[in-house]
Amino acid sequence: MAVFSVLLVLIWSMGFITGKFIVGLIDPNVYLSIRFLCAGLLFAAIALVLGRPFPKWKELPKHIVAGCLMNGLYLGLAYVAIAKGLPAGIMALIGALQPALVTLLAFVLIKEKTSLKGIIGIFIGMFGLLLVVSPTLELDVSHGGVSLLTFTLACTAILALSLGVTYQKMSISSSDIFSSMAVQNLAASVVSCSFMLFLGESLFVVGWQSFALVAWGILVLSGGGVFLMVSLLRKSRRASQVSAMLLLAPPLAAVESYFLFSESMTTIQIVGFIVTIVGVYLSRAKAN
């Protein structure tokens, strides 16, 4: 379990970096459409070879919703935000609120109890997020970077992920994971394709770099990272336990961005990151 947790954190942190690498080579939702479609077909093939049962017709909508939230909406919005100039490290830091949101949503939707200490932690985490984005928040989207638009896209993406993670702990958790992942990825591909058409995205530079990034997304990010996330969620007692592991992804992504893209962080952003981590940690406190 520990090895899988480490792998999940490493792969999850590299997901933010991938969103930066595709800029100029592949439009975000072109990339995601191909990735999810191929990943869905891959998981479907595995399920068929292993003779695993597919969800019944009446259960399909639940798997579709889970896939649209956790993959299509989350990554679609996040990649668009990064493509519009949001630094990968800042996207990762905004994602630090995800465990707190999962704690709250799990309490509301599946009655996972939290404590007063946990609720206070959520507000501390939100304050930390404000510190992180305060030095660079701009109202003019043309300036790029952290603007009102990219900030909103990033926050909406994290909310979608949090809902998707919580949904994975509900009734679909008893279904076969390979067939479920097939349906979820195919559903996510429809969402990404819709974004692609709506935004008029079409860029795909034919070259080894583009094909390598697509293969990386299919085999490592979807076949490895998302699969591990869903698998660990099914085996864990509480959804927030798995989400809390992703707290290690933001600092890793920030370090990766520093070396790969020369992105920097101000003192107030670093303080905000620490405050956010403390808040999210407190939000994991168990109910008495």
Image: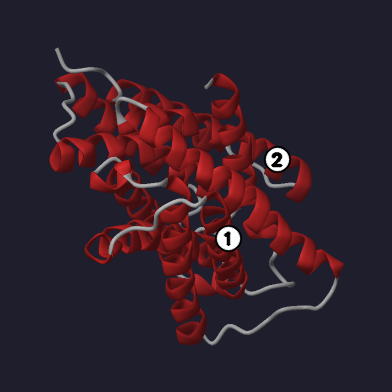
Give the answer, above or below, for where 218 lies relative to 4: below
**Local SS, label 2:** helix
**Local SS, label 1:** helix
With 175 as the anchor, is 135 left or right in this view? right
Q: How many marks?
A: 2
Residue position marked by numbered label 2 in the rendering: 256
- Image coords of residue 144 (percent x, y): 57, 67
Q: Could you tell me if residue 150 is visible in this image?
A: no
Kind of residue at badge 2: Glu
* Residue at 16 percent of width and 43 percent of height: 109
Of 202 and 116, nearer the camera is 202
**Looking at the rendered structure, which numbered label has been put on residue 45?**
1
* Residue at 45 percent of width and 58 percent of height: 71
Which residue, as the protein is rendered here, is positioned at the far front?
51
* Residue at 56 percent of width and 58 percent of height: 86
| Quadrant in the picture for residue 168 | top left
| Quadrant in the picture for residue 73 | bottom left
